Structures are given as C-alpha cells and as structure tokens.
Amino acid sequence: MVRKQIEARGITDPNVLAALRRVPRHLFVSEALRDQAYGDYPLPIGEQQTISQPFIVAEMTQALELGEEDRVLEIGTGSGYQAAVLAEIAYRVYTIERIRTLYLQARRLFDELHYHNIVTGYGDGTAGWADESPFDAIIVTAGAPAIPEVLVRQLAEGGRMAVPVGGQHSQDLIKIYKDEKGIHQKNLGGCRFVKLVGEHGWKES
Ligand code: SAM
C-alpha cells in the first residue's frame, strides 16, 4: 500500500510513511471488509460514514508537518485510523466524534492497541476543544461549508490545519498556516468527504 499508493504519488515525509507502515488498517474496518482494507479507496464503517482512502490520510497528515512534541486535534474520529496514524508521530492526539457508536468503537480499539496518547471526545467537534487549545495542528476529516473560524482560533501561532472546504458532495483540501500576521491558505486539490455536521458546519438532513 505505502509503496504503490503513497510514495508513488509523492508523499515524502518519513514520519508519515513510517506511521502508515505501522498502523494495522485492517483492524479499523469490519471483518467483512478486511480483505479490502489496504485498497486504494475509502470503505464504509457504518452509520453512513467512511474510513478515508489511504492516500488522503497520508496527504492530510503530511500537510500537518507534525513533530514529536505536537498536540493535534482531529474532528471526525470515524474508525479511528487517522487518529492512530497521527498518534504514531505526535505527542498527543485529541479526537472528537459526534456519532456515539463510532466514538465507543474507536475508543475500545485505541485501548486494545495501546494508543495511550489518544484522548477521545464525544459531541459536536465544530466547537473544537477550547479547554485543551491552542493546538499545534488541527485536522478536519469531514467536509466543511467554510473555513471553520472557531477552529482557526484554537490553532497556535505557527500551527497548521488541514480541512476539506466546499459543497456537500465535493470539496477542496485546504491547508492553513497561522502566524503572527494571520492565516495563509493553500489549496491542495479536490477531495470528497462526508459532511461536517454541527453548529458551525452543515445542518443535519
Ligand atoms: N478520520 C476518520 C477515519 O480515520 O476513519 C474518517 C472520518 S469520516 C470521513 C467523517 C467522520 O466525521 C464521521 O465519523 C462523522 O460522524 C464525523 N463528523 C461529522 N461531523 C462531525 C462533527 N461536527 N463533530 C465530530 N465528528 C463529526
């Protein structure tokens, strides 16, 4: 998977490549889908949600430019796979999920796999995690209608954010860098994520 789907498409951060080699992706999908876990596509995880394609996980993780002392916030725990990849590199990962069954399932898996540096939260992640802010990096793994200003406020100076922004069915992956002058944005290209649903996201339909 890493050689053919990730390195071949230009991901070079050695920490990201090593993390993807370490995390057992097949444990983050249902038994029925295990033989497809390393395929070049997203997979359903129940509750009409998905585990992202491996390349998108790699691209977003690389965009965060993580170091081993960084504290990271993830919105959209889902299967927990992206959080596990982040936890292989960063000091601590805070991850929030709004669907209770997914939150509980991911929490159990983090325990089983001994990811003691992942802190889980249940609820609407569009409000961020103010008590633990500021974060060195923030990753939003659901499509937002606009750049989430609440989350930008919880980003440290020097912090990086990766967030899909656009319509309900397709978005652009935006990398944000925050410094003393404000925020700088770079469009990393098109992507397709399920909706970010919440007070500062899309309304539930
Ligand atoms: N990062 C996940 C993984 O590695 O499996 C994939 C995330 S999936 C594409 C998007 C997730 O975001 C879903 O589980 C969905 O329930 C969650 N989500 C959507 N809106 C949310 C919100 N406001 N707060 C927290 N989670 C949210």
Image (spheres, helix red, strand yellow):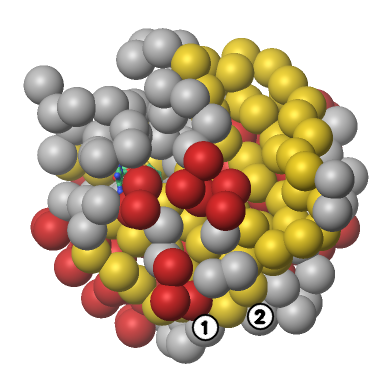
Q: Which label belongs to residue 91?
A: 2
As displayed, is residue 121 above or below residue 75?
Answer: below
Q: Quadrant of ligand 1?
A: top left
Mark 2 close to ligand 1, CB under 8 Å? no
> Residue 114 in the image: x percent, y percent?
44, 86
Where residue 5 sits, quadrant-wise, is top right
For image coordinates 76% across by 48% down, the residue present is 178
Residue sitting nearer the eye, 185 or 24: 185
Q: Is residue 108 left or right of 27 when viewed as pictured?
A: left
Q: Is residue 181 left or right of 90 when viewed as pictured?
A: right
Q: Secondary structure at mark 2?
A: loop
Q: Are marks 2 and 1 in contact (CB under 8 Å)?
A: yes
As displayed, is residue 205 above or below residue 199?
Answer: above
The three-letter code of the residue at mark 2 reads Tyr
For image coordinates 25% across by 39% down, the residue present is 198
Q: Which label belongs to residue 3?
A: none
> Residue 173 in the image: x percent, y percent?
62, 26
Q: Earlier in the sequence, mark 2 or mark 1?
A: 2
Q: Secondary structure at mark 1?
A: loop
Where residue 130 sits, quadrant-wise, is bottom left
Given the current orientation, which residue lies at the most extreme front position? 181
Q: Is residue 22 left or right of 79 when viewed as pictured?
A: right
For image coordinates 34% across by 15% down, the residue present is 168
Q: Work out which quarter of the rendered image holds the C terminus and state it.
A: top left
Where residue 182 sits, quadrant-wise, is top right
For image coordinates 76% across by 30% down, the residue present is 185
**Tag 1 residue:** 117
Q: Work out which quarter of the rendered image holds the N terminus and state it.
A: top right
